[in-house]
Amino acid sequence: MSRPGGWYEADTRFIPGHYQPATLIDLALSRDIDSHRLLRGTGLFYEDILAGTTCVSPQQFFSLIGNARRLLDADDSSFLFGQRLLPGHYGPASHALQQAPNLHQALETVIHHRALLSPLLTPRLVLDDHYAYVYWLDSSGAQEHARFVLEASMTALLAMSRWLSGERLPWECRFSHAEPRYVEQYWVHLGENSQFGCQLDMMRIPRECLTRPWPKASAIARQVALQHAQRELDSLGFSASLLDRVYVYLRHNAHHAPSLELTAQTLGMSQATLKRKLSKHGTHFQAQQDQARKHMALYLYQIKGMSNEDVARYLNFSDPANFRRSLKRWTGCTPNLIRQLFS
């Protein structure tokens, strides 16, 4: 099951069918959806899901999501799915998450064990002096299902933190897409301060909420569960996706924008192979490069408080006009407007 490169891809069959996929299947069945219609074209069989013997690839999971969206035909489906996702019943990783002593440790648990707890979207945590930011990245080629998965993932994190903390935490949710026609579902499940048309798919919360003690934690149970969860990750042979690996490399080296050739070489493959793998995930190298440099620019503006000149210099732009054009292509905004947004 492990891959030589130490990552999973869209066609890697590693997600236990009786984990997150079963959660979506149960939701559909509760609304009288026929299981055969729900699983048609996915390569999955209901009896195998019940037996706990089937592992599902992200591609198969997306096929299941597509069927569920079509058959349920309801604006609240993604949110109801998300409410059931975390901590979930996904073995030791879920047990460790359930015993988290505070929000910070819960977020670190989800991020470290994302192959087990969030295999379709990758959460990332960034801190400044006042806020903690969780932003979400496609890890498996969600394409037309990206919004459904994003709505479910944000709902899952918000519902999980509310349940484990015993209180409604002051999360704010921001989305890169425009306000949808079913915006009332966002208000109900994510709060009325949800914002749209933003630069990132992101949640934020005051930093002091990170370390507020949670009442249900057991240190011993958590430590044992973490050990078992790490053994499960070790047996998989990976903890992140190919898109995760590409993103981390390109963002870490955003100041000199590594070429396709250098990125492929770093990942131990040819340029043609990397291009083919990215295409399989519905993306291409320039899109990944632009995303990484955009995120670094936003980080430097928002978290580091840098000037336009400093951001351009960090990203290795010697010509201010080139920097303005690039930032406008990445974000749709000029450098001055970006600074105004974050100030």
Image (tube, rainbow, N blue to C red):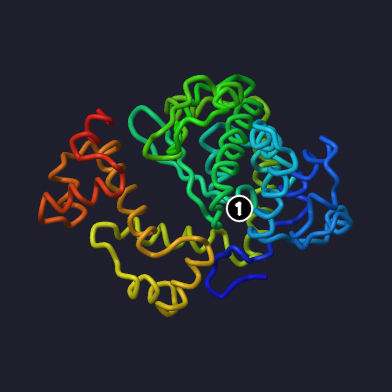
Residue 328, image x and y in percent?
A: 25, 45
How many numbered marks does the figure carry?
1
Local packing at callout 1 (Cα closer than 10 Å; few below 14, some 14-19, many 20+) is many
Above or below residue 193? Residue 1 is below
Foreground pick, 82 / 45: 45
Residue at left 27%, top 46%?
297
Image quarter of residue 176: top left
Residue 323, image x and y in percent?
A: 18, 50
Residue 91 in view (yes/no): no
Q: Quadrant of the C terminus?
A: top left
Residue at left 77%, top 47%?
22
Give left or right: position of 296 versus 132: left
Residue 104 in view (yes/no): yes
Residue on which the image places disc 1: 119
Foreground pick, 75 / 8: 75
Above or below residue 276? Residue 43 is above
Give left or right: position of 23 versus 112: right
Foreground pick, 106 / 284: 284
Q: In which quarter of the image is the N terminus?
A: bottom right
Above or below residue 339? Residue 331 is below
Residue 160, image x and y in percent?
A: 63, 32
Residue 178, image x and y in percent?
A: 44, 34
Residue at left 36%, top 52%?
291
Secondary structure at badge 1 equals: loop
Foreground pick, 98 / 139: 139
- Looking at numbered disc 1 in the image, what kind of residue is underneath it? Pro
Q: Which residue lies furthest to the left in this view?
A: 319
Give left or right: position of 211 versus 325: right
